[in-house]
Image (cartoon, rainbow, N blue to C red):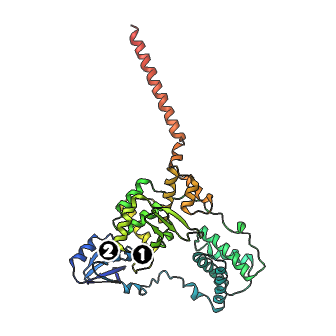
Amino acid sequence: MKKIILKPEIHKNKEIILIEFDYNLKIKNALKRWETRVYWSETFRCWYALKSEFELNSFYDTFKDLGFVDYSLLKKKSSIVNVSVPKKAPIKERLNEEQRTVLNAFYKYLKGKRFSESTLKTYTNLVAEFVIHQKEIKEFSLRDIELFIEYALVPSRASISTHRQFISAMKHYITFTQMPIEIDFNALAPRKSKLLPNVLSKEEVIELIRVTKNLKHRVCIALIYSSGLRIGELINLKLRDIDLQRQVLKVQIGKGRKDRYIPIANVIMPLLHNYLTTYEPKTYLIEGVDEETPYSTESIRKFLKKSCGLARIIKRVTPHTLRHSYATHLLENGTDIRYIQELLGHSRPETTMVYTHVRSQDLQKITNPLDLFVKQIELQQKNNTIFNEKQTLKGTDNP
């Protein structure tokens, strides 16, 4: 079997991925058809792709049957050092021994409250930044928290969501350390942003699926949209969660620790059968380069961005946009909002109600005052024309 070696390199001050292999017409033609643009380098005497555009999962899926893909060199740390923009050292390296001990205990404290892995990581990291800012483990006041927000959190351009998460994390940290401080969350946390989601039209969704040629990528987009999945729910779907006979999939331990069943659209059943026969996944429905490992969220975001370019969609589209579009289209089709809440796995109906603000049918029923004003002018002009014509005819009848 032919060997295809992937290597990180610098070329013309750009990070690239070299694609080395002994001459083979099938591999060469596959490179030219691959969805990511490749270039020939006379310097290295091989093909290459820009690192910013290269997507390992996509490459592996395309070339795994044409040769052995050796990507071991990509796992090594890059030798490229950006001296102009120094990166902040990892949190663990910036903590002293005492701080590390306290934060490890705090992590276990949060784990005992059965928080999700994502919340554990977020809360611990946010508190760690506060502790590093304090420079040492000591008693602190409410003003110390406010100073950290003013001089560290806000200047770092943290989002409103991160700001609110920091306040929540500090409430738990204060309880953990048993310090005599009380935090009024509503007084200290900024008001939550009420942003309306971007929504694709039905035509844009169909075009997005149509232009996505890679079978695995097409299945990902079709499933996220047609089942309203979160990206984390998609990559964690296992083969045992798919019931093709009942035509449903089971989302296990979704957000808020809620399991739910979701129907699979009729039109994607042939696509799903084709994918399962072609790729033969072992554990996860959508597997990564290594067998029995889930696909990466970064890979999904990358190919979705490419597909949007091919479909000429200029809206900002993320995997969650497809979920928003699914919910909005259900509502526009007359589906009861209580069913939509269950399908999306929302704990509160208020979360689902946001889609009532974006469905186009309700917006189209509203008569814009400008349209009404123009119609009134047109009607008035039409009446004046008819009146003038009648007056002209009267003048003609009287000699």
The reply to whether dot 2 and dot 1 touch (C-beta < 8 Å) is: no
Image quadrant occupied by the N terminus? bottom left
User: Would you identify the image quadrant in which residue 37 lies?
Assistant: bottom left
Image quadrant occupied by the C terminus? top left
In front of the other: 337 or 12: 337
Q: Please, what is the three-letter code of the amino acid marked with disc 2?
A: Thr
User: Would you identify the image quadrant in which residue 102 lies?
Assistant: bottom right
Disc marking residue 287: 1
Q: Please, what is the three-letter code of the amino acid marked with disc 1?
A: Glu
Q: Residue furthest bottom?
A: 97
In front of the other: 48 or 335: 335
Disc marking residue 62: 2
Q: Is residue 59 left or right of residue 368?
A: left
- In three-dimensional space, the C-alpha distance between marks 2 and 1, rounded to whole angstroms, equals 14 Å
In front of the other: 396 or 168: 168
Please name the residue shown 63% across and 63% down the image. Answer: 192
Q: Earlier in the sequence, mark 2 or mark 1?
A: 2
Describe the element under mark 1 as helix, strand or loop.
loop
Describe the element under mark 2 as helix, strand or loop.
helix
